[in-house]
Image (cartoon, rainbow, N blue to C red):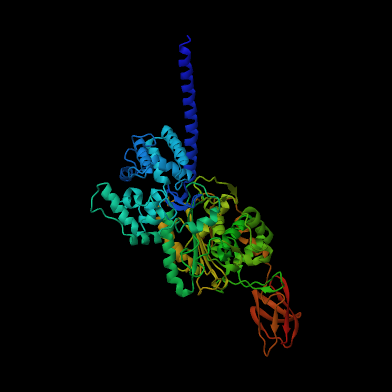
Amino acid sequence: MLKSRPILIIGTVIFFSLLLFLGVTYHLQKQLINIYESRESLIIRDRYGQEIFIKPNQRDNLARYLEKIPPKFAELLIKKEDKLFYYHFGFNPWSISQAALHRLGIGQRKASSTITQQLVKNLLGRELERSLKNKIVELIYALSLETYQSKENILKMYLNSIYLGNQVQGVATAAQFYFGLSPELLTDGQILQILATISSPSQNNPAEEKNTKLAISIAERLNLDENIKLTDPQEVKENIKTYSHFSESYFEIKDLIGDNLKAEELTIDKDLTEKIRKIVQRNLKELKEKKVKNAALIVIKLPENEILSLIGSPDPYSFEDGYQINLLRKARAIGSTIKPFIYLKAFEKGLRPYTLVEDREYRYVTALGFPLYPKNFDYKYRGEINLHYALSNSLNVPTVKVLEYLGLENFYQFLEEDLEFKSIQDLENYQLGIALGGLEMSLMDLSHFFTIFSNKGILRNLKIYLKEENFEKRIADPEYIQLVNKILQDRKTGVDQFGLKSELNLFQENYALKTGTSREFKDSWIIGYTPDFLVGVWIGNADLTSMDAISGQQGAGRIWSEVMELLFNSEYNKKTPFEFNLIEEFYQNGHLEYGLGNDDFEKGLNTLKERESVLILNPHQGDSFLFERETKIILKARENVNWFVNEEFFDIGNKVIFIPEKPGQYQIKAEAPDGFQEKITIWIIED
């Protein structure tokens, strides 16, 4: 019994010593693993895993981590650095003894570190410290790694951790940075050039002349083929010039994600974006003679509202006018692209595509007291038309009447509360000018709001990360959305304004669109969509100068049509049809029109006309005219009327000429055959 006690004590000591060793080594290797994982650069990738951006790590290095070790690289590395790598336990006793003898002046071997020990030095940041104490600490850490990690893991960690000059960490980054290749495509010569870098990364990397001699020396030492091909340092330098740790796509993305960087795939399609950027560049080159410098574009995948492509600049690397500005996010006057939203809200209030409206000259007084005479794009009036025709041909005057019917406060509320749009100035400043295209909005916001027409009245947040959640908000009921889509999809009714041949006529029919042009041709817009995707385009000048009479159709429309056709031939085109199951057909003067099943057709037809009590079309209440020799004023009415001037009978007809005899105030009265009368007051003033 007494004899067994020492054995028991020794066994207990050994057992607890082993536990202590395992506990300590586990903690030490875990510490190294945490350091290793923290030094991997954050990489932003597109929806297909293609790299868009690599963020420097805390050491300001670019570190892409390999998942699989290139066999040839591993073979040559082990031959050069650690021939017994697969046989030792983190350190090589023979190598250590040789190094010790060298310190005593016996023998020539200086280096003694295994790959595992080199990895430990890299992770602990002690590459340049060579004290005995540090070597003992590194030895313990190396034992810890070897106890818990496989040889393959240790080798992979080493290849991902070694510094190779020029802020390059790891073999994967070095292969791209110096040679423009992925690691598995490196030649034996290029592998040797990277291996020659390890000892002195700043002075011996592949861009330096010394590197070639060292690589040849290593090849000789490893008994490799004497004719092994090396990449010339000058060629390496040329590749470094073209290398970038972010693609062009990152220029627009960085403004959207800001500091919210996550190691998740984006919704962006990098290849699609590169193709679209080339389309934008080529078209801007052709439009240069029309004084067009800048453009922006967005593609949104529907119904998920995933952003596929963002173009805020034709070339983010260029220093041409405005090319360093992301114009996707800049608010500009959106022209007629606001009209579908005005008509949508008016349809909710009772108007219909078949509702009649008088397209003629009207006079309004602005908030500042100035007269406003709304004009159409071509300065023509078309008389009595319906709202389908008015929206299809993007007519301004009928839209003003529709907005007037809807009510400015109601539309302000829709913009601010429903869409949650934040205007750059108080909406009260725009008044009826909203219908004339004066409202400013960014292409990003405008395109986002337009997604309600594809998504059946639902507004979802724009997604930039694939795993991002969608938040939904109902903006409008689907039947009113269908009425708007029916008009915006109709390419025939808009022939009057856009012509038979147009950039807007595509080979696939299930698409809808709206163009816009701001005052003085400063902005050209088009938002077009199918149920599968939306493309928004803006062109103009960052410095707010005018283009040379470029409309939405001629300018943005050219780029838009090319991008739409690109998408029609892509996987994103599911050819999903628009839904029109909630609307009904009506015949109006032999033409097919659309409304809702429970409509009172006659009431809907004349809703705006009943509000229109105007008999006198010209002049307008409060008009002033300069008194000159034989000043002529056209008196024009809706029908044949009796005209009175200052209560005295003057003439009969729907259009007569009045020549005032002297300056002063004049009352003009028109009396219709049914007895209805209207009076206005005008002034004839002297210079």
> Image quarter for residue 388?
bottom right
Locate residue 63 relative to residue 438 in the image: left or right: left
| Residue beneath the point at 30% across and 56% down | 213
The quadrant holding residue 665 is bottom right
Q: Work out whether residue 162 or residue 17 is closer to the camera in this orientation and state it.
A: 17
Q: Single out the residue that lies furthest toward the top.
A: 1
| Residue sitting at x 28%, y 53% | 216
**Residue 685 screen position, x and y as percent:** 73, 84
Say whether residue 294 is left or right of residue 207: right
Q: Who is closer to the viewer here, 467 or 223?
A: 223
Q: Which residue: 45% across, 34% down? A: 144
Q: Is residue 241 left or right of residue 494?
A: left
Q: How many marks?
A: 0
Q: Is residue 286 visible to us here? A: yes
* Between 603 and 254, the one nearer to me in the picture: 254
Nearest the eye: 119 or 536: 119
Tell me residue 417's x, y (percent): 65, 54
At horizontal 43% and vertical 46% (from top left) the residue drawn is: 161
Residue found farthest to the bottom: 629
Q: Quadrant of residue 283?
A: bottom left
Q: Position of residue 3 (x, y in %)?
A: 46, 11
The quadrant in which the C terminus is found is bottom right
Counting from the top left corner in percent of width and height, residue 614 is at 68, 70
Q: Is residue 298 visible?
A: no
Question: In the displayed structure, would residue 26 be above or below residue 472?
Answer: above
Q: Is residue 93 above or below residue 369?
A: above
